[in-house]
């Protein structure tokens, strides 16, 4: 019997998409802890998750508002930010059009606005702001927006996560198939997707995306060598990617055992079972 062993997935693959585009907000007025992070909601980098603590109270008739700013003076309001009774702001903005926010915006700011606001399209006095360093921003784009040599010019980290998800689905199909032939077919798909050999994958492969992701995260770190937050983010992204690559390699090797098996009386290996469980952890 083809038995599935479900184990928890310890690799937080979404780390890859977020660490390189985290802007910690530096205070113009007082200390403010927290971050604004691009994440995927309905499309790649189409949302901004804001989480701040120690937010000072404003006088009656004033409110905080969040903004994304680009290098050419363009601006996007991400809404009025509501301070909780514990001095926190925890909010998420999702682009209604599915815009890849990381493609355009490199600075986040919090303004103080009058209530009511006679000019809602223009930021008021900026209380807090921070930005992805200009030297790092192009590398962020290569990771989460576009890289020309990839299939469909998709971002490197986007391709990495996407292909891990495709491999996970086929691991799941292998686990659920009733015939040996179908199990072996989907196990072979896992191998092809990981190695970039075509089939249901995009032909580039998890391993190639992973190698490029590690390389470009390193470029980001080198581009802002004096910026500790960039270095820490790059190191964390590299570590997460290395874990993901090792995970995919083990799943590939276990899929190869399944393909070579002459009977359906084999167990789904640990790594392949973990890839199955990825379909329930945000990659399906």
Image (cartoon, helix red, strand yellow):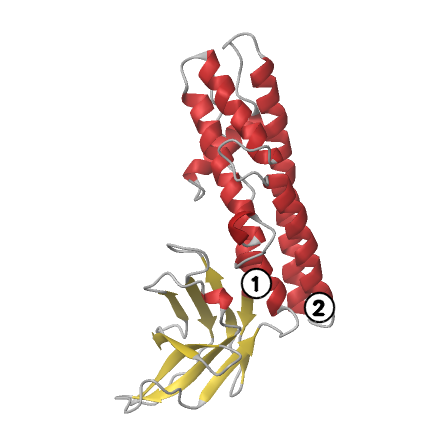
Q: Secondary structure at mark 1?
A: helix
Pick whichever of labels 2 and 1 is earlier in the sequence: 1
For the residue pair 35 and 180, the one nearer the viewer reads as 180
252 shown above or below 32? above
**Residue 121, x across and y down, in percent:** 34, 85
Within 10 Å of disc 2 (Cα), the crowding (few <14, some 14-19, many 20+) is some
- 196 lies above or below 30: above
Q: Residue 98 in the image: x percent, y percent?
A: 37, 60
Residue at image coords 44%, 78%: 55
Q: Which residue is the site of mark 2?
A: 223
Q: Residue at x 47, y 76 (%)?
A: 54
Q: Which mark is residue 71?
A: none
The answer to whether residue 172 shows anywhere in this view is: yes
x, y (%) of residue 62? 33, 88
Is residue 119 rendered to the left or right of residue 240? left
Quadrant for the C terminus in the image = top left
Counting the numbered discs, the total is 2
Tell me the SS state at disc 2.
helix
Place of residue 18 in the rendered image (x, y in percent of width and height, measured from the top left)? 53, 58
Res 141 label: 1
Look at 51% across and 81% down and name the residue there.
72
Could you tell me how far apart the alpha carbons at marks 2 and 1 are, in whole angstroms? 14 Å
Q: Dot 1: within a 10 Å radius of its alpha carbon, few (fewer than 14), some, or many (20 or more) residues?
A: some
């Amino acid at each position: 019997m083809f038995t599935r062993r479900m184990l928890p997935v310890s690799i937080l693959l979404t780390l890859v998409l977020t660490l390189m585009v985290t802007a910690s907000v530096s205070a113009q007025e007082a200390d403010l802890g927290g971050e604004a992070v691009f994440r995927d909601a309905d499309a790649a980098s189409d949302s901004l998750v804001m989480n701040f603590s120690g937010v000072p109270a404003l006088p009656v008739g004033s409110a905080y508002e969040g903004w994304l700013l680009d290098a050419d003076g363009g601006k996007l309001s991400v809404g009025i930010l509501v301070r909780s009774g514990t001095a926190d702001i925890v909010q998420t903005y999702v682009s209604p059009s599915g815009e890849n926010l990381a493609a355009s915006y490199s600075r986040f700011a919090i303004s103080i606005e009058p209530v009511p606001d006679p000019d809602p399209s223009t930021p008021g006095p900026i209380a807090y702001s921070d930005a992805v360093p200009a030297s790092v921003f192009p590398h962020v784009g290569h990771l989460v927006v576009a890289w020309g040599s990839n299939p469909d010019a998709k971002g490197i980290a986007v391709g990495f996560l996407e292909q891990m998800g495709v491999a996970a689905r086929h691991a799941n199909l292998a686990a659920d198939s009733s015939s040996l032939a179908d199990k072996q077919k989907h196990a072979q798909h896992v191998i092809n997707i990981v190695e970039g050999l075509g089939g249901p994958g995009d032909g580039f492969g998890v391993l190639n995306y992973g190698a490029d992701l590690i390389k470009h995260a390193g470029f980001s770190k080198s581009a802002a060598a004096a910026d500790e937050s960039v270095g820490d983010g790059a190191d964390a992204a590299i570590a997460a990617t290395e874990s993901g690559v090792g995970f995919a390699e083990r799943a590939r090797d276990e899929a190869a055992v399944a393909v070579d098996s002459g009977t359906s009386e084999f167990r789904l290996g640990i790594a392949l079972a973990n890839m199955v469980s990825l379909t329930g952890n945000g990659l399906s």
